[in-house]
Amino acid sequence: DVKVTQSSRYLVKRTGEKVFLECVQDMDHENMFWYRQDPGLGLRLIYFSYDVKMKEKGDIPEGYSVSREKKERFSLILESASTNQTSMYLCASSASTSIREQFFGPGTRLTVL
Amino acid sequence: EDKVVQSPLSLVVHEGDTVTLNCSYEVTNFRSLLWYKQEKKAPTFLFMLTSSGIEKKSGRLSSILDKKELFSILNITATQTGDSAVYLCAVEWGAQKLVFGQGTRLTINP
C-alpha cells in the first residue's frame, strides 16, 4: 500500500512565525504535490515537484516555498505565517506512469493566530 | 481560466436511495477526470476516466465521462451510511496537474 505521511495532524502557530510542513512517501514516486483545502474552494495546488530539487508553482504559490532534497520528502515552508494561511494542507504523490492516481496524506490542519 | 464545478454542493438522502453527483469542467489540455472520496482525512481514489461513454464500476459506485459535453457523473446505488463523505472531482491537465471542484458533501441518513 502506498503510504503518504505528514509530520503533524494539527499545528498552531503565531503570525510571523516560520512554519515547516513535512511530507514523506514510501512508494518511490517521482511526483509530489502540496494543496490547501478551504470550505467552498476545494483543493488548490500550491506547489508541485517532478523530481528531486525540482519545483514548480501551482495556482496559489504566494507566501509559500518548497524544498525537495530527497525523492521521498517534500517540504512546504511558510516563511512568515499569516492568518489567511489558516487551512487544511494536504500532500500527495504519484508515479510518472500511465497510472496517474495521486495518493494523499492525512492532512495537517494549520491554525495561525 | 480552468475550472471544475460540482453540483450539488450538498445532498442529504435516506439510506437505500440512489444519488447522482455531477461534475462539469472547462479545462485546456484535458487528460483525465478523477473522482475521490474524502471522509475525515485523506481523499481516497475512486475512478479515473479518460474516454467518453465507457462506464467505470466498482460495487455500488459507477461513473461515466462525456468529453463532448464536458461533464461526468458519479452514481451511487442503494446508499449506505458509510457512503457519507465529501466527493471530489478533479480534472488532470498538462502533466499530472489536477484542478479540483469544490466537492459535494453527501449525507446518508439511516
Image (tube, coloured by chain):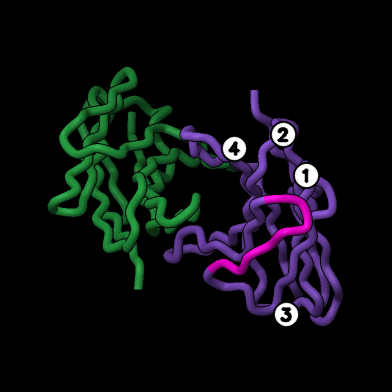
Residue B41, x across and y down, in percent: 59, 42
Indicate the amino acid at tag 1.
Answer: Lys
Q: Do labels 1 and 4 share a chain?
A: yes
Indicate the amino acid at tag 2.
Answer: Asp
Tag 1–tag 2 contact (CB < 8 Å): yes
From this view, report whether residue B63 is shown above or below residue A59.
above
Tag 2–tag 4 contact (CB < 8 Å): yes
| CA distance for labels 1 and 2 | 7 Å
Looking at the image, tell me whether mark 1 or mark 2 is earlier in sequence order: 2
Label 2 sits on residue: A28
For the residue labelled by badge 4, is the local secondary structure a helix, a strand or a loop?
loop
Residue A53: quadrant of the picture = bottom right
From this view, report whether residue B5 is shown above or below residue A91.
below
Which chain wears green?
A: B
Indicate the amino acid at tag 3.
Answer: Ser
Q: What stretch is highlighted in magenta?
A: A51-58
Label 1 sits on residue: A71
The question of residue B65 being in magenta is answered with: no
Residue A27, x across and y down, in percent: 70, 31
From this view, report whether residue A3 is shown above or below residue A35.
above
Quadrant containing the N terminus of chain B is bottom left
Looking at the image, tell me whether mark 1 or mark 4 is earlier in sequence order: 1
Label 3 sits on residue: A82
Residue B19: quadrant of the picture = top left
